[in-house]
Image (spheres, helix red, strand yellow):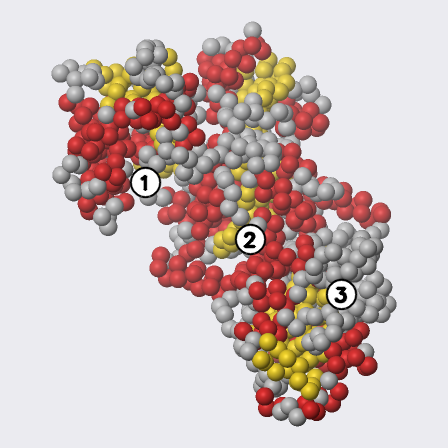
């Protein structure tokens, strides 16, 4: 039998099936192997909102998209080249993302009458049989039957056998992309080390899938994706929420503070809690509070006591935390608030992504309670951004919002991990003990950064009271004096503004420093914008890309940068939020480009917009 | 340094701020008793923290020369939880009112109690909203006429003792502003208890709810209406302790000791007895009702149960023992790495 080996620069595969089909595991295994083989990668899982939606239904479809290549990869892919479906619902839910000419690998057992009906195909219609898929290459495999045959003499029950179906698919895809399976073999050996029978069964099915590709004459094309020319260094794969957790741990470690993480479970932020809860040996105290308000208030208590206080949630929970965040602006103590954004308003779209909580972070408190805001742009950037949020919080004694979103929180990419010694130092000095003969302690006396001392309980001579009532300047005593109130409002605002002196200047990510068009993005749109701008530049368009991490205060040179371009285009996964802040501050006629579908921008959408504006 | 601490007196706990409660407010007495008791506890002043919510009582920290936080409405318990979880060596006191602790802060109250952080929670109960000028509170009796209930409140009130015991509080006591000696004793016992200690303090709001507790404080009625409980002693009350409480199965009955009933048959208080504490917590009748039981004061119940902060810190120690102290570089590296040269 002759098979051809075609070399591809980049491939996007969508694995889709029932939420019980082990799709996420199949996807992450293939991803880890791709990463270890030197491909650049980007992934995005697409979970159903329901935990166990009825089997076989559209609501129960779980997906995992992987984009890997021998070129630099910045997004999980606008669509996919290969769609692996375990049942009819998975096909129906994902077909529109498959590129024309793409490959469908279908588990035929998932296309029986029952599954077709659950997927709401009309009676008698089977997409595998009716010619509707003729624009694609369809490979039909009865995965269920093959798996059962492979394990026929294993002595295992059918139900248990069927759980290994995903290994058959994984093995087959490994064959198709000419990949070494040793990483997955080692993984299975570790995962089931207490159940040798399961190791044997899973390996058998994995190899059966691989051999099926090798021996069946149906498949005559194999593909190869060579290693990417990536920046030299040592890599690991990392997901956004995991990176955020590591960033917090690293910040606590470098500042010699103990980390207190007060939170209440909410999608898509909970994985940070799960991650941190594993690392008690780092002295981390995770506190699963009774509600969102207790989560932030307990964190304020911990921070008052001298811990690095971090709370996290998503939009609905942040709304509940609003009053307490206002308290922290009055107390002027460090507080990091992670908002892993999701579709809103209200409960909105819990498992979908959106960038619609920026104005909530900026203004979502009664009175004028300014806070610092920074945002992560990629999964691995969650590390640096979370770390930086902690640095600003403790060095400037202020609440800091760390904004991420469901797209990068659950997405993953290769990361050149730093070594502890190379991380930026974080300077923390608690106020020192005083003797009775020393001058009276002034808890609201400020330094050159306008920052007050962090005077923690247990320090002799620093006994003082703080609270949410307006403070008298310097003494911190209650004051209702009109002039003092205005002074304090201004001081709190200036303190946040002054952070701009202690953050890096804005850089241009790509493209000319002056010219016709600047794409100004923030957060998780980074990958799509980057990909689109690289393409447009290669086609001769005069376009540049800047991505803002520091959203409040802005970097000092941002206004200058904006004035260097004829047009500023601002893509956001909302109806236009950063654009309001930019127009307000710099009085420029920036153009919004908005999408509010719970889905990220595709790079094609951005590219088309660039072409439209520059033609 | 030791001697310096021993030399602390009540006035060392007084701040330079003017106390701004209404003249005649019961809060003054409570403040005085707390300031009087603290020097005897042997705790360095800098290790004491008062955390409050919102309400008249919650101004308390401003008047205590210790560390303090006047937080937001209902959340002092949550703030204190985070503080105690991270700084177990501190002596943490929460000052709250009936509205602050049982209405807006009701959720945090019950969760504080089940977790059993080692803190002292003083609930100043005046059965009214004072700071907002006189609306009924979750502790106001049914039918209470207030600005927001001109035809009488139709809210059934909380019974703080039953609420606390229902949430598995490990210490509950009741005292009152007008009985300084008793209050001081209860404060000391509350501090000595390891775990969340709830002290409900009947406190007169002389502006918006004057006389709410006068049957328990005035000479003419006090003896008949109050029942001071002490472990090991029979439940006695009345003029010359002439009445007692007997348990008839699970039903408490008032007996008259002058008509041949023996004091030996009376209910002997045991603050470690959970079942009896539950019954005692139900001595909550409207004093106007006929054949009502007297209102108990003193320590209803206490038990020893592990504190959240101790368990949390034990887990950290166990994790360090099992895995070694966290190595940041190993953590950042993870399990699977590859190199590009």
Q: Is residue A26 visible?
A: yes
- Say whether marks 3 and 2 touch (CB < 8 Å): no
**Residue, disc 2:** A290
Residue B229 badge = none
View extreme (top): residue: A615
Q: Is residue A451 visible?
A: no
Mark 2 closeness class: few <14, some 14–19, many ≥20 residues within 10 Å: some
Query: Quadrant location of residue A69?
Result: top left
**Residue, disc 3:** B126
Residue at position x 68%, y 56% from top?
Answer: B103
Q: Distance between the residues labelled 3 and 2?
A: 27 Å
- Residue A249, percent from left and from top: 47, 48
Q: Are marks 1 and 2 on the same chain?
A: no
- Using the image, determine if residue A27 lies above or below residue B237: above
**Residue, disc 1:** B336
Residue at position x 82%, y 64% from top?
Answer: B209
Q: In this view, does A28 lie to the left or right of B240?
A: left
Residue at position x 76%, y 69% from top?
Answer: B203
Q: Distance between the residues labelled 1 and 3?
A: 62 Å
Camera-nearest label, 1 or 2: 2
- Residue B176, percent from left and from top: 73, 74
């Amino acid at each position: 039998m002759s098979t051809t080996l075609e070399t591809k620069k980049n491939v996007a595969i969508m694995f889709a099936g029932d939420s019980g089909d082990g799709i996420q595991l199949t996807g992450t295994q293939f991803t880890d192997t791709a990463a270890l083989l030197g491909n650049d990668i980007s992934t995005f899982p697409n979970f159903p909102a329901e935990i166990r939606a009825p089997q076989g239904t559209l609501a129960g479809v779980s997906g995992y998209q992987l984009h890997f290549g021998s070129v630099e990869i910045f997004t999980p892919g606008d669509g996919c080249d290969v769609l692996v479906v375990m049942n009819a619902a998975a096909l129906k839910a994902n077909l529109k993302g498959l590129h024309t000419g793409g490959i469908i690998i279908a588990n035929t057992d998932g296309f029986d009458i029952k599954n077709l009906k659950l997927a709401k195909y009309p009676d008698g219609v089977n997409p595998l049989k009716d010619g509707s898929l003729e624009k694609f290459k369809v490979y039909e495999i009865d995965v269920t039957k093959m798996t059962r045959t492979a394990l026929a003499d294993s002595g295992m029950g059918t139900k248990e056998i069927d759980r290994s179906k995903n290994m058959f698919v994984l093995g087959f895809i490994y064959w198709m992309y000419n990949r070494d399976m040793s990483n997955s073999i080692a993984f299975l050996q570790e995962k089931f080390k207490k159940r040798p029978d399961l190791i044997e069964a899973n390996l058998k099915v994995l190899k059966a899938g691989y051999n099926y590709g090798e021996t069946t004459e149906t498949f005559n094309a194999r593909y190869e994706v060579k290693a990417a020319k990536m920046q030299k260094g040592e890599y690991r794969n990392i997901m956004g929420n995991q990176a955020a957790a590591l960033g917090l741990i690293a910040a606590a470690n470098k500042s010699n503070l103990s980390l207190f993480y007060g939170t209440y479970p909410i999608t898509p932020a909970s994985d940070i809690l799960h991650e941190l809860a594993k690392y008690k040996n780092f002295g981390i105290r995770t506190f699963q509070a009774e509600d969102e308000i207790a989560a932030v208030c307990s964190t304020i208590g911990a921070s008052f006591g001298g811990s690095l206080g971090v709370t996290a949630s998503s939009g609905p929970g942040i709304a509940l935390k609003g009053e307490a965040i206002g308290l922290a602006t009055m107390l002027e103590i460090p507080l990091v608030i992670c908002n892993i954004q999701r579709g809103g308003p209200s409960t909105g779209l819990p498992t979908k992504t959106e960038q619609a909580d920026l104005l909530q972070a900026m203004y979502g408190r009664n009175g004028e309670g300014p806070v610092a805001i920074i945002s992560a742009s990629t999964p691995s950037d969650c590390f640096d951004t979370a770390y930086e949020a902690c640095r600003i919080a403790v060095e400037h004694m202020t609440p800091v919002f760390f904004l991420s979103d469901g797209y990068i929180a659950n997405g993953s990419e290769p990361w050149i991990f730093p070594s502890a010694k190379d991380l930026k130092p974080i300077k923390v000095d608690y106020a020192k003990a005083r003797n009775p003969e020393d001058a009276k302690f002034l808890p609201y006396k400020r330094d050159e950064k306008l920052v007050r001392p962090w005077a923690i309980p247990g320090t002799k001579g620093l006994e003082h009271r703080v609270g949410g009532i307006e403070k008298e300047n310097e003494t911190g005593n209650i004051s209702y004096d009109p002039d003092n109130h205005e002074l304090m409002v201004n001081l709190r605002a200036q303190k946040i503004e002054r952070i701009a002196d202690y953050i890096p200047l804005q850089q241009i990510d790509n493209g000319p420093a002056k010219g016709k068009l600047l794409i100004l993005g923030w957060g998780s749109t980074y990958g799509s914008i980057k990909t689109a701008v690289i393409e447009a530049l290669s086609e001769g368009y005069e376009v540049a890309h800047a991505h803002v991490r520091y959203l409040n205060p802005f970097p000092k040179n941002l206004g200058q940068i904006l004035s260097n371009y004829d047009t500023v285009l601002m893509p956001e996964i909302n109806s236009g939020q950063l654009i309001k802040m930019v127009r307000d501050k710099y009085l420029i006629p920036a153009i919004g480009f908005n999408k509010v579908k719970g889905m990220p921008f595709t790079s094609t959408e951005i590219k088309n917009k660039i072409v439209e504006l520059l033609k | 340094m030791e001697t310096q601490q021993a030399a602390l007196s009540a006035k060392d706990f007084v701040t330079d701020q003017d106390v701004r409660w209404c003249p005649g407010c019961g809060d003054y007495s409570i403040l005085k008793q707390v300031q009087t008791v603290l020097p005897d506890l042997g705790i360095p002043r800098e290790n004491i923290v008062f955390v409050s919510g919102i309400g008249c009582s919650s101004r308390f920290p401003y008047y205590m020369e210790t560390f303090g936080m006047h937080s937001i409405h209902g959340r002092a318990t949550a703030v204190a939880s985070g503080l105690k979880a991270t700084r177990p060596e501190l002596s943490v006191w929460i000052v709250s009112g009936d509205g602050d602790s049982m209405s807006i802060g009701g959720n945090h109250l019950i969760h504080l109690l089940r977790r059993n952080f080692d803190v002292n929670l003083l609930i100043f109960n005046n059965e009214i909203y004072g700071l907002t000028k006189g609306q009924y509170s979750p502790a106001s009796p049914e039918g209470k006429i207030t600005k927001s209930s001109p035809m009488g409140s139709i809210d059934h009130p909380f019974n703080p003792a039953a609420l606390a015991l229902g949430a598995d509080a490990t210490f509950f006591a009741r005292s009152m502003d007008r009985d300084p000696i008793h209050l001081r004793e209860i404060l000391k016992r509350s501090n000595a208890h390891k775990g969340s200690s709830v002290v409900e303090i009947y406190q007169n709001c002389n502006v918006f709810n004057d006389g709410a507790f006068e049957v328990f404080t005035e000479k003419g009625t006090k003896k008949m209406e109050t029942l001071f409980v002490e472990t090991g002693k029979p439940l006695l009350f009345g003029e010359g302790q002439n009445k007692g409480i007997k348990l008839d199965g699970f039903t408490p009955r008032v007996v008259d000791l002058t008509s041949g009933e023996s004091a030996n048959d009376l209910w002997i208080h045991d603050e470690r007895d959970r079942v009896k504490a539950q019954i005692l917590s139900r001595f909550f009748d409207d004093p106007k009702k006929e054949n009502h039981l007297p209102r108990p004061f003193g320590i209803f119940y206490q038990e020893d149960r592990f504190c959240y902060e101790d368990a949390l810190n034990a887990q950290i120690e166990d994790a360090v023992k099992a895995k070694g102290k966290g190595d940041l570089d190993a953590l950042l590296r993870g399990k699977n790495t590859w190199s590009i040269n």
